[in-house]
């Protein structure tokens, strides 16, 4: 059902717009086959995105359509389950429009994305929780100076034990995080409210939200630029009361 919920969210924003113990900095690999099987009983994600893109596609000129087809032949798109692959022009249009809408940007369907410069693993969970003290904190530590505003698409799991198998299967889209120019070692703003909507509370049952047995949250982080997502990074943070 995660895919269905995701697709419903995508449709609404487009309408408005028109074991495994990964450490910080480890590049994300696509979901394992045991995890991806959950998509088989639902309408394929590309078909849904293509359907949503058809209205926009029909309005494009032949020159604009050729531009999308050319772009799709030389670029991959990241699908919502983390797989990066090449698709056809109309499918690429659907994915890019979805991402632009979630990032709060104009659809601009006539223009394929411009070339992006990916910064690599800029965000980590070093001394960044998640924390449960007071209102709590879910966010990241900046590991490289950011001289310009950047945007990041964030997926996260509910609280899981360290021994969780294939935590990638439980990733839910949380938000598009916009970061202003930031210095090394800064903490980002919290995405706690958005995490709460996507996964529920990260508080444990003990005083101050502590967990009697260690619990962790896995995050998948992609830099965003003009409808595209860069390479993903999978991070794991232990839930703590405070630093």
Image: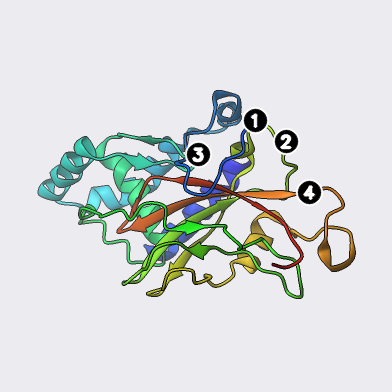
Rendered location of residue 172, percent (x, y): 59, 49
Whole-percent x, y for residue 77 in the image? 34, 42
Q: CA distance from mark 4 to mark 1?
A: 16 Å
Sequence-wise, the earlier of marks 4 and 3 is 3
Mark 1 closeness class: few <14, some 14–19, many ≥20 residues within 10 Å: few
For disc 1, the marked residue is 19
Q: Residues within 10 Å of mark 4 (few under 14, many from 20)?
A: some
Quick one: label 2, few (<14), some, or many (20+) residues within 10 Å? few
Q: Is residue 140 above or below residue 28?
A: below
Earlier-in-chain disc, 2 versus 4: 2
Q: Bin the neighbour count of mark 3 within 10 Å (Cα to Cα): few under 14, some 14-19, many 20 and up.
A: some
Whether residues under marks 1 and 3 lie with C-beta atoms below 8 angstroms apart, the answer is: no
Residue occupying image coordinates x 30% and y 47%: 93
- Horizontal side of residue 104 vs 154, given as left or right: left
Quarter of the view holding residue 49: top left
Which secondary structure lies at badge 1? loop
> Which residue lies under the disc numbered 2?
163
């Amino acid at each position: 059902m995660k895919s269905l919920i995701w697709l419903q969210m995508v449709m609404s924003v487009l309408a408005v717009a028109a074991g495994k113990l990964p450490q910080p900095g480890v590049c994300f690999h696509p979901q394992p086959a045991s995890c991806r099987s959950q998509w088989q009983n639902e309408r394929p994600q590309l078909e849904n995105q293509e359907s949503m893109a058809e209205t926009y596609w029909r309005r494009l000129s032949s020159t604009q359509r050729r531009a999308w087809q050319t772009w799709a032949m030389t670029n991959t798109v990241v699908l919502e389950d983390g797989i990066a692959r090449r698709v056809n022009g109309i499918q690429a249009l659907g994915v890019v429009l979805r991402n632009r809408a979630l990032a709060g940007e104009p659809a601009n369907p006539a223009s394929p994305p411009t070339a992006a410069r990916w910064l690599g693993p800029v965000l980590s969970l070093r001394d960044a929780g998640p924390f449960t003290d007071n209102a709590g904190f879910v966010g990241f530590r900046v590991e490289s100076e950011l001289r310009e505003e950047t945007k990041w698409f964030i997926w996260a799991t509910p609280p899981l034990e360290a021994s969780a198998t294939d935590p990638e299967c439980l990733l839910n889209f949380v938000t598009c995080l916009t970061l202003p120019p930031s210095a090394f070692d800064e903490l980002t703003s919290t995405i706690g409210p958005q995490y709460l909507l996507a996964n529920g509370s990260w508080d444990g049952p003990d005083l101050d939200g502590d967990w009697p047995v260690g619990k962790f949250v896995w995050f998948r982080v992609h830099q965003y630029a003009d409808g595209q997502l860069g390479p993903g990074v999978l991070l794991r943070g232990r839930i703590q009361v405070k630093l």
